[in-house]
Amino acid sequence: MKILVDADAFPNALKEILLRAVLKRSITTLFIANKKISIPNEAFISMEVVPLGLDVADNRIAELVEAEDLVITADIPLADRVVAKGAFALDPRGTIYDEENIKYLLAMRNLMDELRCCGEITGGPSAIDAKTIRTFADGLNKLLSKMDKNKSQEML
């Protein structure tokens, strides 16, 4: 089990929470972005810089992800690809993507994208606040606990 982070726009406040959880459990974690970001000097935490381009980081994550991995991304089409591979996905705002909700969320994302293109809706998501940080931390803890439980059962 590993964690893959779509790191191009991953907020620093959330990165700190993620790193605390990763360091506590020594989870292999890979940050993927089109620019270098600061990460701790730990053997199980690494950074991969991909070339600039549309969906280059997303495609690399989709290539690397395996069943039971965790991907952190705000990109719903990427989350759909991740869930299809039997992995877990978590939005930086705390939404856990799974087989039960991903198709609905993808359809809503496509509808909202269409409405934005037509000028019906403007603006983007709100800024990261304390509530969002708590929601992300709760979602992360829930998924890591589930993954820990799955790992324990496999060892039996």
Image (cartoon, rainbow, N blue to C red):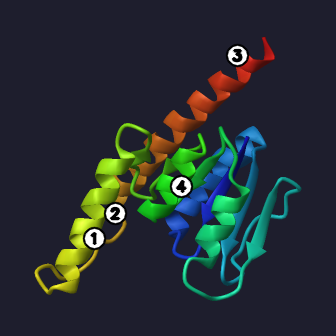
Residue 48 in the image: x percent, y percent?
A: 76, 72
Q: Which amino acid does label 3 sit on?
A: Gln
Q: Which amino acid does label 4 sit on?
A: Arg
Which residue in the structure is indicated by mark 1? 126
Which residue is rendered at x = 21% and y = 80% of the image? 116
- For marks 3 and 1, the one nearer the N-term is 1
Based on the displayed image, in which of its 4 quarters is residue 85 positioned?
top right
> Disc 1 vs disc 2: Cβ atoms closer than 8 Å?
yes
Which residue is labeled 2 in the image?
A: 129
Q: Considering only order in the chain, which callout, 1 or 4, is on the residue closer to the N terminus?
A: 4
Q: In this view, does 147 lie above or below 58?
A: above
SS of the residue at dot 3?
Answer: helix
Which residue is identified by label 3?
153
* 114 sits left or right of 64 in the view: left
- 110 lies left or right of 9: left
Picture disc at residue 107: none
Q: Quadrant location of the N terminus?
A: top right
Front position among marks 3 and 1: 3
Query: Which of these two is toward me, 128 or 108?
Result: 108
Measured in 3D between alpha carbons, the distance from the residue under mark 4 to the one under mark 1, in whole angstroms, is: 25 Å
Reply above or below: 49 against 70.
below
